[in-house]
Amino acid sequence: MTMSAKSDNSSWDNVIILGAGASCDAGVPMLGSFMDTMWNLAKLGKNGGVHLSELDRKLLSDALAIRDELDSFHGRASLDVWNIEEVLSLLSFNALADGKNEGKKLDLMTKAIARTIELKCTVRSEGKLNERVSGDIQIPGVYLTFWRGLFAWAAKTGSPLPPIITFNYDLILERSLLYSVIGTQYAGSERFPGKGIRIDYHTDCMAPIFLKHKFADFWKQERSNGIPSQERGLILEECAEQELEQNALGVDLLKLHGSCNFPKPRRTKQELPPAGERLALALEDPLILPPIFNKATETVGTGAWACAMQAMRHCKNLIICGYSLPQTDIYMQYFLKAALGPNRDLNRIFVFDPILFAAEPEAEGTALKSRYAGNFSDPIQKRIEFQPAILEKHRGSGGTFEHLSWLLIKHPELLLFG
């Protein structure tokens, strides 16, 4: 699967890569604390004071029991059963060696991971395209700022949105994308850049989704007197590609490690909602990949990876946020080398990480710089910006996703080419 026929290399002037650090504002646990979070949920039986359902508690407890079985490896192999990547890797190899029963254990663990993400994620959705988010759901503004900044830049410059490459399973980007449109005005200078949205994952797991927008009336409950008032704003409606008359805002969302809304191939037991609703709804048994790739794991297919590779080979500016390129992630190190190695137009690489903005230089920040620099030649190393523009307003949050989002909406010219 490739970029749409109406796209060309100019669509790839900018590329954004988002790692786990980009999801922490929504409560999704980082890899280092993921197993602790799952353990606490299962043992306490509560999530933020709310009791878990019996099904959720059983799922998480069963996953922990599978993890505990791996203790038998301690006599001969070094294994940290509190590290989710090590647990998934070992289960994946066990599935390769021991067949169906071990494969079921891997499936159960990935289901528990997806459910843990959903339980902790504060950006929630019922998948509706024609209703504003209810007042009891608090959406961190940083995610709305991210999308609105990109929308405004696309409307002003006429440029396509940067492809977004992410290693995260969660649905924060999808949900905040909907919330940044539904119920808003987008009138005058803040017009929406297009007649609708095309969302393309570039995978056989999910066909492209086309959403047209139109104005509708909303009821708003006034806080002062409690009397509802009526407002007009945009809603979205799933449509055929032809209805957008080739005037859709393209959102290329490349989720290389799977997603909580990707159905597993060759499994028909799950009843799937319409594609437009499924965009923001987590499935009970989604396709999410362990950190290693082998014949025992189902994959998102070559489309997303090939698309990501081509976009990075043609981009001029690359923005990386929330990903520290760990030393153990050899696969991604070679992916970066293979993707950026042939790129003769690479202008800048912006790396957003709070460690790089610490008040005093730390060994961890020095190591992060070394990991990135070690993948590139001397001329490219000089074009890596480890401290992207920081203004006084965000001096205390430098290197965070909030920092990135604020720059996109206030000073996109400092990051985006075009």
Image: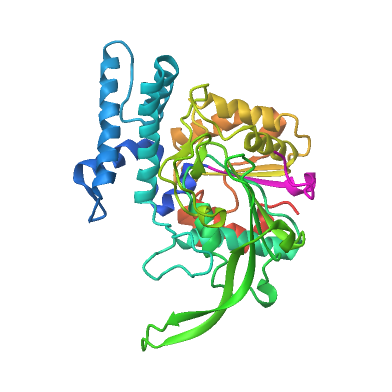
Q: Is residue 50 left or right of residue 206?
A: left
Up-down relation of residue 66 to residue 345 (above or below): above
Q: Position of residue 351 (x, y in %)?
A: 58, 42
Q: Quadrant location of the C terminus? A: bottom right
Nearer-the-camera pick, 301 or 164: 301
Up-down relation of residue 153 to residue 32 (above or below): below
Q: Quadrant of residue 302?
A: top right
Q: Quadrant of residue 382?
A: top right
Q: Quadrant location of the N terminus? A: top right
Q: Position of residue 313 (x, y in %)?
A: 73, 36
How many numbered circles are shown?
Answer: 0
Q: Quadrant of residue 217?
A: bottom right
What residue is rendered at 49% in x and 25% in y? Answer: 292
Up-down relation of residue 58 to residue 150 (above or below): above
Up-down relation of residue 348 to residue 73 (above or below): below
Q: Is residue 410 visible?
A: yes
Magenta stretch: give its range.
1-18
Q: Position of residue 110 (x, y in %)?
A: 40, 35
What residue is rendered at 25% in x and 43% in y? Answer: 57
Q: How is the image coloured?
A: rainbow
Q: Is residue 101 left or right of residue 147?
A: left
Nearer-the-camera pick, 347 or 31: 31
User: Which residue reaches farthest top?
Assistant: 76
In reply to whether residue 200 is colored magenta, the answer given is: no
Q: Is residue 356 visible?
A: no
